[in-house]
Image (spheres, helix red, strand yellow):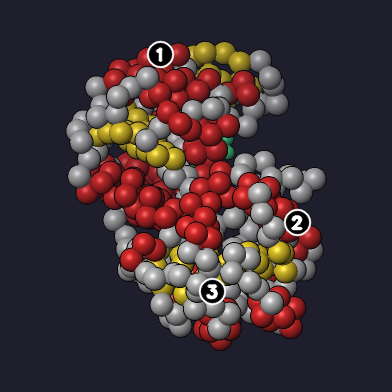
Amino acid sequence: MKRIDEVNLRNKTVIIRVDYNVPINDKLEITDDNRIKESLKTINYCLDNNCKIILLSHLGKVKKEEDKLKYSLKPVSERLSLLLDKQVTFVPETRGNLVKETVLKMQPGDIVMLENTRFEDLNDKKESSCDLELAKYWASLGDIFINDAFGTCHRAHASNVGISKYLPSCLGFLVLKELDNLLPIINNPERPFTVILGGAKLSDKLKTVENLIKKADYILVGGAMAYTFLKANNEEVGKSLVDEDSLEFVKSLDKEKIILPIDHIVSLENKEETRVVDKISPNEIGLDIGPKTRELFKSFLEKSKTIFWNGPMGYYENPIYQEGTKYLCEVISKLDVTSVVGGGDSASCVINMGYKDKFTHVSTGGGASLELLEGKELPGINI
Ligand code: AMP
């Protein structure tokens, strides 16, 4: 694996795999452009080196023809153009004559973005199955490949691992920044090291949880995940979201370092009124951590030197249940600690609640950051 600043890019045609898998609403507006902003350093570095730049990215999951309408990268190319204050030529194809003609006409300093690489998934999953004929075709468009898409580094696709088989390749600044911030967390954290786990999908995170339990001093569990832990302890969790498939796994864990909520914000099904309770009744749903839990978690955070956070503390999509997540943001923002947020929903919360600059690092990759913390080697890094 080479770094971008170890490779001579001068006057070259570079293919940059970026991660522009950004949230887009029904009006095709981008609701969070953090990943586009984070990619600018590598793009500007290539512009300074007089490169021609070809950008590749996926957006969403493309399973049927209709998905193409909502997952075109055109709005993304327009936002990038705005952020760079420079023309970005969008090609609404992933290969073919228009791609070839556009690339042939490029001048140094030009930027071309091809259509969503996952449009190729409609054709026998060519992108996601790392089809080498497709990878070779994309590689034929440039001289050097730069992987700057941290969010897909845990997957071997044609547009990342595939292309790297056919071109001199290196990692871009965004990926390097992610590694610089995430690797010390598992390899050598300053102690006490506290992990905050929340969100809902425990089954996706089992290996990470297992590895982090070995490495961390304290694990604070909130969000829906806490109800799986409480149920595993035979506590009443009412109608709260529980990941039944992960109960046996949770029962097998060493609980010594695990701190669970001691009170909850609950509601009745389809009701907006909330109550704070220490014990959940059979007809209630736990939707956020309660005030005593916030204080309990704060006391552990205040004695920490390193904090890693993955997963919101509540059902934050409804503002009534954002308090726990916001409170932890506020507490961490005032501490002199290394604070790293894994990607996904917790990153969106931190950014949308206005705390991004208060954290040491907010990762752009959910699955990728978790797999890195599992201790895995990511295929997109080993290029
Ligand atoms: P994940 O993708 O695993 O990080 O989970 C994020 C999701 O967990 C978000 O959609 C949150 O609304 C959801 N979530 C967090 N806490 C709760 C809860 N107590 N009840 C239901 N959903 C929750």
Give the percent coordinates (x, y) of residue 261.
40, 23
Q: Earlier in the sequence, mark 1 or mark 2?
A: 2
Whether residue 55 is visible, yes or no, is: no
Quarter assignment of residue 376: bottom left
Q: Secondary structure at mark 1?
A: helix
On the rendered image, what quadrant is the N terminus found in? bottom left
Residue visible at 42% across and 28% down in the picture: 358
**Which numbered disc flags the more N-terminal residue, 3 or 2?**
3
Of helix, strand and loop, which one carries label 2? helix
Among the two numbered marks 3 and 1 on one chain, the one whose residue lies closer to the N terminus: 3
Q: Is residue 97 above or below residue 158?
A: below
Image coordinates of residue 48 in percent, x first then y, are 50, 59
Q: Quadrant of the C terminus?
A: bottom left
Query: What's under tag 2, amino acid-wise?
Result: Lys
Disc 1/disc 2 C-alpha distance (Å): 43 Å
Q: Is residue 247 visible?
A: yes
- The residue beneath circle 1 is 292
Residue 6 to residue 222: above or below:
below
Quarter of the image where ligand 1 sits:
top right
At a point 37% along the width and 69% down the height, the residue shown is: 7
**x 62%, y 32%: residue:** 317
Instruction: Name the amino acid type tagged 1.
Output: Lys
Q: Is mark 1 within 8 Å of ligand 1?
A: no
Mark 1 crowd level (few <14, some 14–19, many ≥20, 10 Å Cα): some
| Inter-mark Cα distance, 3 to 1 | 57 Å
Q: Which mark is residue 70?
A: 2
Q: Nearer the viewer, residue 117 or 237?
A: 117
